[in-house]
Image (tube, coloured by chain):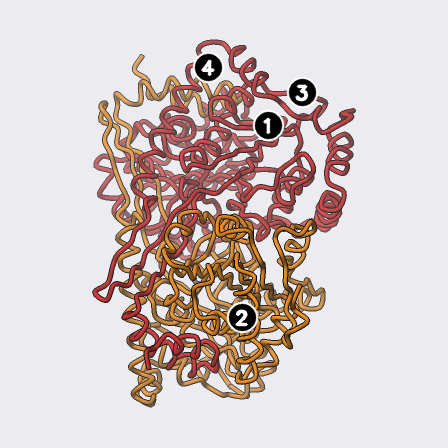
Chain colours: A orange, B red
Amino acid sequence: MSSQRYETQLSRLDSSAPDFAPTLRQLLAFEASEDAAIDASVVEILQAVRTRGDAAVLEFTNRFDRLTAQSMSALQIDAQELQVALASLPSERRQALEAAAARVRAYHEVQKRECGSAGFSYTEADGTVLGQNVTPLDRVGIYVPGGKAAYPSSVLMNAIPAKVAGVQEIIMVVPTPDGVRNPLVLAAAAIAGVDKVITIGGAQAVAALAYGTESVPQVDKIVGPGNAYVANAKRRVFGTVGIDMIAGPSEILVLCDGTTDPDWVAMDLFSQAEHDELAQSILLCPDADYLDRVHASIDRLIATMPRADIIRTSLRDRGALIKVRDMQEACAIANEIAAEHLEISAVEPRQWAEQIRHAGAMFLGRFSSESLGDYCAGPNHVLPTSRTARFSSPLGVYDFQKRSSMIEVSETGAQSLGKIAAELAYGEGLPAHARSAELRLKS
Amino acid sequence: MSSQRYETQLSRLDSSAPDFAPTLRQLLAFEASEDAAIDASVVEILQAVRTRGDAAVLEFTNRFDRLTAQSMSALQIDAQELQVALASLPSERRQALEAAAARVRAYHEVQKRECGSAGFSYTEADGTVLGQNVTPLDRVGIYVPGGKAAYPSSVLMNAIPAKVAGVQEIIMVVPTPDGVRNPLVLAAAAIAGVDKVITIGGAQAVAALAYGTESVPQVDKIVGPGNAYVANAKRRVFGTVGIDMIAGPSEILVLCDGTTDPDWVAMDLFSQAEHDELAQSILLCPDADYLDRVHASIDRLIATMPRADIIRTSLRDRGALIKVRDMQEACAIANEIAAEHLEISAVEPRQWAEQIRHAGAMFLGRFSSESLGDYCAGPNHVLPTSRTARFSSPLGVYDFQKRSSMIEVSETGAQSLGKIAAELAYGEGLPAHARSAELRLKS
């Protein structure tokens, strides 16, 4: 490998190396640590909120966020204050936020129309009607982290699909350590149509939403990212309420045929690496010289990055430039990786996209930088991480809807179906099932 | 209440009683017990299978199922043996199983067509293309319990939607304690198109499917019911693979306007209660006399039931006949209960169905007994329990598909989107995101 020539430490792999498969597996391996102290703390917080309601939420919030609120009403942000936050934004930023929201809404409205939201129904020859109703969830809770990871774009991406789905009430929780409120986050809540904002966070906020308290109504589902306490609490309340996926570190995989400006690809890798030290940026390319040029771009550009330290650690520990035999092999490896974000930076990118079975979102062509998708292309930026794109999907309107089967058997239908059901019920040793079907048979 | 007149113990409630709301809440409350011994055992089993693969699976299987298999190949059932099991069935039973499979397949094929499986794509004025791809999971594992709860109908209900979705490989695991194989279950696997059957069960089977071993390929999702060990193991491997909902006890809620033969309704309540002591059967009706008649039917019919002991315990501990003010109120209470199975046994049932927001499956009209849905109406019998119909859906084709967002931004599109993305990225303190968008801007 030629990486000695470069300053930025970064794995350089070759798919033809005999140890490539295990090396790649090693590189991809990520396991969320389980921390017994966090676990015990979350159990205690959930139990306290469940039994003592608002009083417990208030105590934990004052303690963890260093507040002195006297009542839960002091932790509510009313609609007027959201509008004030929106009005206070510089006009360029406000316009950007509104433009992004409009595009996200437009995409999810198409998604709603195309994803079977109307349900279906059909009538059989004997008059039996079968079908499926689709209805929105009643009430949804959105968790928004406080502090440095407070992203207004995440407010849009979580709240808008719920709103488009027809959810009646969206409750947002966001901790405000030391009482500091983030006006961009509040403005995003106003734009997205959030109904209620409560400045609580951590496991206590998850518990309040999952079980309900005197002042916080129980929700049907909790979505949104959070720290280890929040993730642990969400796992534990799953079943009482629905939850979205527990997100792992963010990832980008770039498939490049060597025709994109290396600076562009280097910056795309940075844009993932700057999230945090555990983020993963990988580039696959059949052209070894091109990989060298990207490495050189990385060396040159990294110094200009305000978050260079995070980027360096992320690239060193989890990044890789990988020489592949050809683009076909790059697609096969991409299916193995099942990345959250997959850029296909190539001429005629669709020929490669057709070979991809597993990816959270695909960005086709050199103008489709992942950052456009993060903010304003329209599709959701909440995507499956850590290879879960093998079996899960971007957050969408469908996550805020559920289905009910509809079965209306005609008297004639009950005759033929009743005999089949009774035969099988007796076979399974469930005679009341059989009798229930047989009672509907005409003698 | 008038229940003293009846032999069968069963809660008799009235929605106008001052303590009705808390009493109902109490009746519905169900919490899966958490058992520290099971927990510790599952952790050990998962770890052993993860590190030692087939050897560990073989050891646990021989120990727990009292077998003496020398290798994993001894635990495989080949396609020929499945066909032998199918051929060995009495012809009435085989025909019933095949008729049920055909109807389940037909319904799920309509569902596939109607639930957005084709994905979508649209082109904006500047040439930017946005859309969503829908693809099947590659490989799915189906858990089938052994022993008394071995239901061939569950094999059909889990495997057929996966097959219709286009899953390439379906692996079924089913424990065979003392080497006893259930021919009806194997015949159902043959009919449903299961690709591979392995006679392993418990947490060791879940681990083998989730992590893969020398002989068991890693799957992308595990579905199907199991005991407390299986449920615990599924929860723990969630994230490495997808899982379906963890099912609670089965429930039926009957809304009746008093026009259905009371024997029919009594038997419908039994058909749920006979599953197990924790199953829940509830009837809502505005007519107090009718409730008495159903109670009398219960008294008369229960003695004829082979599973009368289970039914008696279930009705006593968890069943209820509830007098409501009118059918409107019945619908409101039904939305609160969010039942797995909801029978609307009434003339013109659709007027009430329109008021229902939350139910796993609705059975409309007096001929639609729940048992028809359990076996052969067509819709899936794997349904959300324990109020989870508020936020989740019947098992369906969509559970074996996942979506990928598609973003192909044109050069023109990158100009307008890039400015919005950069503005917001700077606002969030993510400068590499901003630069990545800005590099695509023409000067």
The residue that disc 3 covers is: B180
Q: Amino acid at mark 1?
A: Val
Mark 4 element type: helix
The residue that disc 4 covers is: B94
Q: Residue at x 44, y 31 (%)?
A: B160
- The percent coordinates of residue A25 (x first, y second) are 65, 53
What is the C-alpha distance between the residues marked 2 and 3? 64 Å
Q: Are marks 2 and 1 on the same chain?
A: no
Q: Earlier in the sequence, mark 4 or mark 3?
A: 4
- The percent coordinates of residue B90 (x first, y second) are 49, 9
Mark 1 element type: strand
Q: Are marks 2 and 4 on the same chain?
A: no
The residue that disc 1 covers is: B197
Mark 3 element type: loop
What is the C-alpha distance between the residues marked 1 and 3? 14 Å
Q: Chain of mark 1?
A: B
Mark 2 element type: helix
Q: Amino acid at mark 4?
A: Arg
Q: Are marks 4 and 3 on the same chain?
A: yes
* Quarter of the figure with residue B67: top right
Residue A293's tag is 2
Q: Are marks 1 and 4 on the same chain?
A: yes
Q: Quadrant of the N terminus of chain A?
A: bottom right
Q: Chain of mark 3?
A: B
| Label 1 Cα neighbours within 10 Å, binned few <14 / some 14-19 / many ≥20 | many
Q: Residue at x 51, y 86 (%)?
A: A69
What is the C-alpha distance between the residues marked 2 and 1? 51 Å
Q: Residue at x 62, y 49 (%)?
A: B237
Q: Earlier in the sequence, mark 1 or mark 3?
A: 3
